Image (cartoon, rainbow, N blue to C red):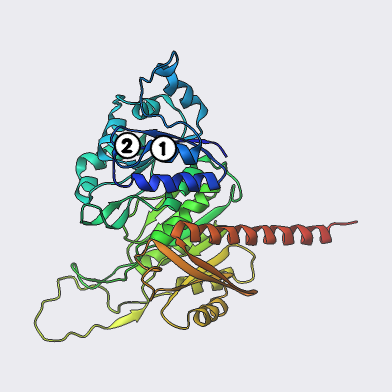
Amino acid sequence: MGLIALGVTGGIGAYKAVEIVRRLQQGGHDVVTIMTPNARRFVGRLTFEAITRRPVIVDQFAPGANAAVEHVSLATDIQALLVAPATANTIGKLAHGIADDFLTSLYLVTRAPVVIAPAMNTNMYEHPAVAGNLQALRARGAHVVAPGEGYLACGWTGPGRLASVEDVAAAVEGRLRPAAGLDGRRVLVSAGPTCEDLDPVRFVGNRSSGRMGFALAAEAAGRGARVVLVAGPCGLEPPSGTEVVSVRSAADMHAAVMRGAVEADAVIMAAAVADYTPGDGPRPQKIVKESETITLTLARTTDILAALGRWRGGRRLPVLIGFAAETRDVVARARAKLEAKRVDLIVANDVSRSDAGFGAETNAATLVAPGGTTDVPLQSKRGVARVIIDRLQGMLVERDTADAVRTADHEPS
């Protein structure tokens, strides 16, 4: 719980900042809003004052004896500074230390954690100047919440849309939350697709975006875990506080996961690992387009989750959690995998849904465990990650308690 300073800048995503305030309040936080002059072109200050029950700060030089140093006093009171939406203009000012309004002055004075949620046109977001400014802010400790992809107000489609309210709020709370829950635990998460190369140009892959695995890694790291993220090619911003191992093929991922599992308290296999790979490996030269058809011989890849189950055997750790991406008989197939692969939990996804699974920013799932099933309703992938990590924490506590009981039973009376 704490006082959060929310800086709202001049972009169409400013209206979502109202929802962000609500979400932070639901988490028990108090919010004070700072609006740039251009932000007031999109949302009125009275809206924020009504829901925060605090005056909105709009002027660095407001009348009053102490107004000129208000940004200094506020800087020492806040537990975090969130800028959402953050325009390219404001990002540039923050990166270069330009303090020409209250928000940019506050940024230079505060030593509280800083979270920045960019929102802008796709080309603007991908411009080297903006990318360089964001990298500079990250290097100074700011946490950048990557924007979502989709239809933008300008009519374009691509990255640049303000991240979901849930993801932005979770990023702030992750910076505030002391190490707890998973403090000292070691968690390995796999994420994204694998690419099975056919030749130097082509590969066999799938539509996994990696968002679910990255959300799980971020949630575990936010609770104090030491997280190793084994990621296939997906191009997402790595979550803060994680060690990233980049892989490409199913074989690469198998080697990295089995190597990391030795020291892990939990392994979460959220990656969409290819089931088949070219039987004789990739061709050294590009396959020439000569005939109307082509025959490829594919061989099964190693089932990493099943390999983990065999390797663990009857030991209590690591906890093993897998994912089942299905298009029919979702729960039945997940239950069969749970038993066949000797794991503790399967997260079942119906990937035939347009609003869940591969590529979507939201997800819905069914948690399938030996003791029954739990439905997780549609929400952001960070929200689903929170439910899964809650379950993981519970399983770790149960194992610790069982160990303590066994130890006590064997102690001499």
Q: Quadrant of the N terminus?
A: top right
User: x, y (%) of residue 387?
Assistant: 55, 60
The residue lying furthest to the left in this view is 290
Between circles 2 and 1, the one closer to the viewer is 1
Report the front residue among 300 and 8: 8
Residue 196 position (above or below residue 137): below
Circle 1 — which element? Answer: helix
The residue lying furthest to the right in this view is 413
Visible residue check, residue 260: no
Three-letter amino acid code of the residue under disc 2: Arg
Tell me if 152 is positioned left or right of 268 in this view.
left
Q: Residue at x 48, y 22 (%)?
A: 73
Visible residue check, residue 55: yes
Alpha carbons under labels 2 and 1: distance apart: 10 Å
Residue 46 — which label?
1
Three-letter amino acid code of the residue under disc 1: Leu
Residue 281 position (above or below residue 213): below
Q: Residue at x 58, y 68 (%)?
A: 312
Q: Residue at x 53, y 76 (%)?
A: 341
